[in-house]
Amino acid sequence: MSEDKILPKDIDSDYSLPGRYEESSSINVESISPQNPPKSKSKNLLIAIISFAIVSSGFFSYYFINQNEIDSQIIQNTLNISPEQILADQYNVGEYGSDHSHAALLVVVDGEQLNFGLAQFQLSNKYIHFENHNPYLIHKHATGVPLEMLFVSMGLEITQNCVFVEYDFSKNINEFCAEEDKQVQVYVNEKRFLPDIGQYEIQHNDRILITLDEKSISKHLKYLNSLKIFDVPEKPSINLERDIFI
């Protein structure tokens, strides 16, 4: 055999053969290219993606379960709107001072009149409230104000069958309900009132009775009519035609 046909003795890989160097180099470069990262980096990236997916799914699940409460809190915190103003916007209440009316309200549970002269019921809403420790006289200071705004502000709820009252700022609700097959009795100016009394807007000199005691309605109405409703003070008139010179 001729000498030029014998392979070199120190050759231990075919990549050293003519034409194989480029192939060997291309394989090595490809193995570390961005499209083919090392296995350890790929594993870490996969773990990070899975972790992010788990955290994200947990967050969105919590959000959708508590969506209404979260949205309400975000809106309230962002706009810094008080519950009073939220109700005023909801009912399209007029500007403060756009009306001034007085009415008498008597709520009787367990045979006793609720005492709205207590501090917790006084001046609880600027649009409609009790004041000066008076236990029955409502003051309304804007148009479009329903009784619900008064009830909500002082922890009172009237349903078809029950009266719920929050006492002493304790957040403990006292429940008074009518007897079986009975309803809360509501009268406005001595006439039975069947709609939701919370949606009613008082007019000056209204007299409103809410009671669970059907047997004593006539007595309560008589007492309600005896209560004094003060006239609304008239605003001082300005005589623009008066001579301003002395």
Image (cartoon, grey):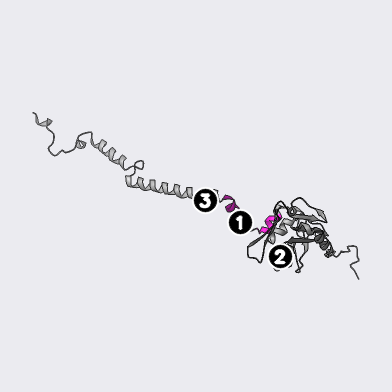
Q: Position of residue 9 (x, y in %)?
A: 12, 37
Query: What amino acid is labelled 3 in the image?
Result: Tyr
Please provide percent x and percent y for residue 29. 30, 41
Picture residue at 82% right of the left edge, 54% below the top? 191
Task: Identify the secondary structure beneath mark 1.
Answer: helix
The residue labelled by disc 3 is: 62
Q: CA distance from mark 3 to mark 2?
A: 37 Å
> Considering only vertical position in the picture, is 11 above or below 125?
above
* First to last magenta residue range: 67-88
* Comparing labels 2 and 1, the label whose residue is closer to the camera: 2
Instruction: Please tell me which residue lies in front, 119 or 61.
Output: 119
Kindly identify which residue carries mark 1.
78
Image quarter hosting the N terminus = top left
Indicate which disc, 2 or 1, sits on the residue closer to the N terminus.
1
Residue at the spot of label 2 = 121
Are the residues at dot 1 and dot 3 in contact (C-beta closer than 8 Å)?
no
